Image (cartoon, rainbow, N blue to C red):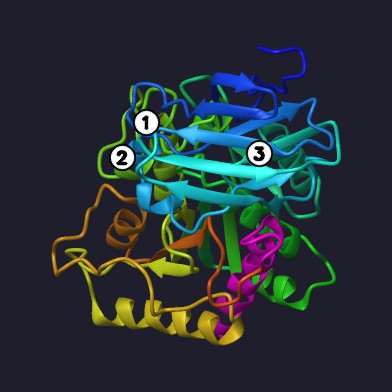
Amino acid sequence: MSKDAISIDAGFDSGNIEVLDIAGATARLAIRRDNASEFFQWFHFRVSGCAGRALELKLTGLASAAYPDGWVGYRACFSEDRDTWYRAETHYDAAVDGGTMTIRHTPQAGTCSFAYFAPYSMERHHDLVAEIAASEGVTHRVLGTSLDGQPIDCLSLGEGAKQVWLIARQHPGESMAEWWMEGALDMLTDPADPHARKLRQLCRFHVVPNCNPDGSRRGHLRTNAVGVNLNREWHEPSAERSPEVLAIRGAMDETGVHFAIDVHGDEAIPAVFFAGFEGIPGWTEAQGEAYRRYRAILERRTPDFQTKRGYPVARPGRANLAMATNQIAERFGAVAMTLEMPFKDNDDLPDPAQGWSPERSKLLARECLAALLEWLD
């Protein structure tokens, strides 16, 4: 490495990058796979010694990533203050070096962070839990611990009869899911918000902001400490493979579930959408109609949500009950759904500066909860 070369590091919470070569302000990099897994797509690293320099960062081998279609039309996130995140000039060429994404940016500051999406650190998670747990009417409990010994935090509030579960970040690289959670919890604990006040009267909320703290801290895309995809464990979770799901599902068994949202991010589709529970063995038309009605209310309330693009619908009786939404809908007769937000931008309402962002994730959460109140009424 030359004396004038930039330096790159990722030895921090959610960090993920391997440095292959650095020459001046140009670097060749690779993303580390999730532990004991073939999944990789999440990256998060810091560049130092870069003030006023035209960076050229080449992430290689990406054609083998979990979702290679996710690189097409994608722009990498960057921040010079680790607070506000913008989008950098980004180009993907599947034919170069096993699939190469080139990020170009000239920072003004001496350090600049880059990530697949704006990170939500475990430190921020603990700050969020502490702040919300100190709010009036909120109960905090630890549902269980992860394989690395981290707590599975659950925050409960509200006095109503309807049991509402909100869970996020089964896939740790989908950090927009915990930004959504921050927006939801901010609203629900706001004593001045009339929607929140009414929701607390009608519902008992159980909120798990981060289902996969081990993967989050380790810089994984999709799995826990031992390479297990938690959203394929809901049929038969185990203490050895998926104690996180075992703890959460057990707590749901204690309360029952009327309504649930499992919050995620999608790598390829530049839109916000739901995946429902069509195809569960116990499907009823009344249950399906209730889901469609909630979806229609949200689509009317916010132009950030749409119903034209999404995943294929499972055929009758063919739903995968190892997935949270399907298991919850089948197990409890609940109206359940998976909310997907984009890693790219929302093409219906593009933002050239930030793309889809933490700020929009938090605002969407408020609309989802206001839509829930309208749906209940």
Q: Are marks 2 and 3 in contact (CB under 8 Å)?
A: no
Q: Residue under circle 2?
A: 233
Q: Given the image, on which type of amino acid does mark 1 rest? A: Ser
Dominant secondary structure, magenta:
helix
Seen in the image, is 62 located left or right of residue 138? left
Kind of element beneath mark 3: strand
Q: Earlier in the sequence, mark 2 or mark 3?
A: 3
- Residue 187 found in image quarter: bottom right
Q: Position of residue 136 (x, y in %)?
A: 81, 54
Q: What distance separates the C-alpha of mark 3 from that of mark 1?
A: 30 Å
Q: Position of residue 247 (x, y in %)?
A: 44, 36
What crowding class fits label 2: few (fewer than 14 Cα within 10 Å), some (14-19), or many (20 or more)?
many
Q: Are marks 2 and 1 in contact (CB under 8 Å)?
A: yes
| Viewer-nearest residue: 79 or 360 | 79
Q: Residue under circle 1?
A: 242
User: Total marks drawn?
Assistant: 3
Q: Earlier in the sequence, mark 2 or mark 1?
A: 2
Q: What distance separates the C-alpha of mark 2 from that of mark 3?
A: 31 Å
**The label number, if any, that marks residue 114 in the structure image:** 3
Asked whether residue 285 is drawn in magenta, I would say no
Q: Position of residue 263 (x, y in %)?
A: 50, 56
In the rendered structure, which segment of residues is drawn in magenta? 352-377
Q: Is residue 84 above or below residue 213?
A: below
Q: Given the image, on which type of amino acid does mark 3 rest? A: Phe
Kind of element beneath mark 2: loop
Seen in the image, is 162 located left or right of residue 113? left
| Viewer-nearest residue: 150 or 78 | 78
What crowding class fits label 1: few (fewer than 14 Cα within 10 Å), some (14-19), or many (20 or more)?
many
